[in-house]
Amino acid sequence: MARINVENIYQTSEGQSFFELYNYEPMVTAFGQRTIVAVDDYYHQGDSYRLIADGDEPGQRYGVLIFGWGSCSGCDALQSCSSFKEVQELADSTQDSIKWFADKEALRKYVVEHDWKGDYSWPDTELHKYLHLVKEFLDSDRD
């Protein structure tokens, strides 16, 4: 997948510092054509869970993206960036963390078989909500 160019996504005005960048959504949107499911923790720091798609049916891929964030430059990777180079490195590593699946069946297999209980975010109720919504999406076209 082609890399995004963060300078086209994040515009900084004169006098604005990079630590004022806090919104991951422009980055995530640029990774895929659209977001199908989006769930976020509701704390000062936490995780975001996304199901994204690139392309159109038939033949579009589905991506699972889970990333953490914080409320200040000490605990949030985007807010701690001090240059476009650092934002680009963060975007590249976040993009590399997307787990892509060729179709709904491959995604379904992953969602059902993955050891979610072994993941660090298992106790989080927002992860459970995300998984429920992804399963609803996957079952939406079944009879």
Image (cartoon, helix red, strand yellow):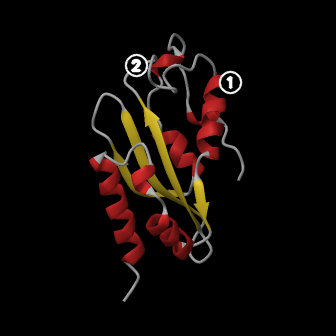
Q: Which residue is at the front of the view, 72 or 127?
A: 127
Give the left or right position of residue 2, taking residue 117 as reference.
right
Residue 2 in the image, given as x and y percentages of width and height: 72, 49
Q: Which residue is at the front of the view, 22 or 50?
A: 50
Which residue is denoted by mark 1 in the rendering?
85
Q: Please identify the quarter of the rendering in which residue 36 is found.
A: bottom left
Residue 26 in the image, given as x and y percentages of width and height: 50, 40
As shown in the figure, which amino acid type bears the numbered disc 1?
Lys
The residue under the point 30% across, 56% down is: 129
Q: Which residue is at the front of the view, 16 or 23?
A: 23
Identify the disc placed on residue 72: 2
Q: Circle 2 sits in a helix, a strand or a loop, which is it?
A: loop
* Residue found at the far front of this picture: 118
Task: Indicate which disc, 2 or 1, sits on the residue closer to the N terminus.
Answer: 2
The residue under the point 56% across, 27% down is: 11
Note whether 127 is above or below 18 in the view shown. below
Q: Please identify the quarter of the rendering in which residue 9 is found.
A: top right
As shown in the figure, which amino acid type bears the numbered disc 2?
Cys
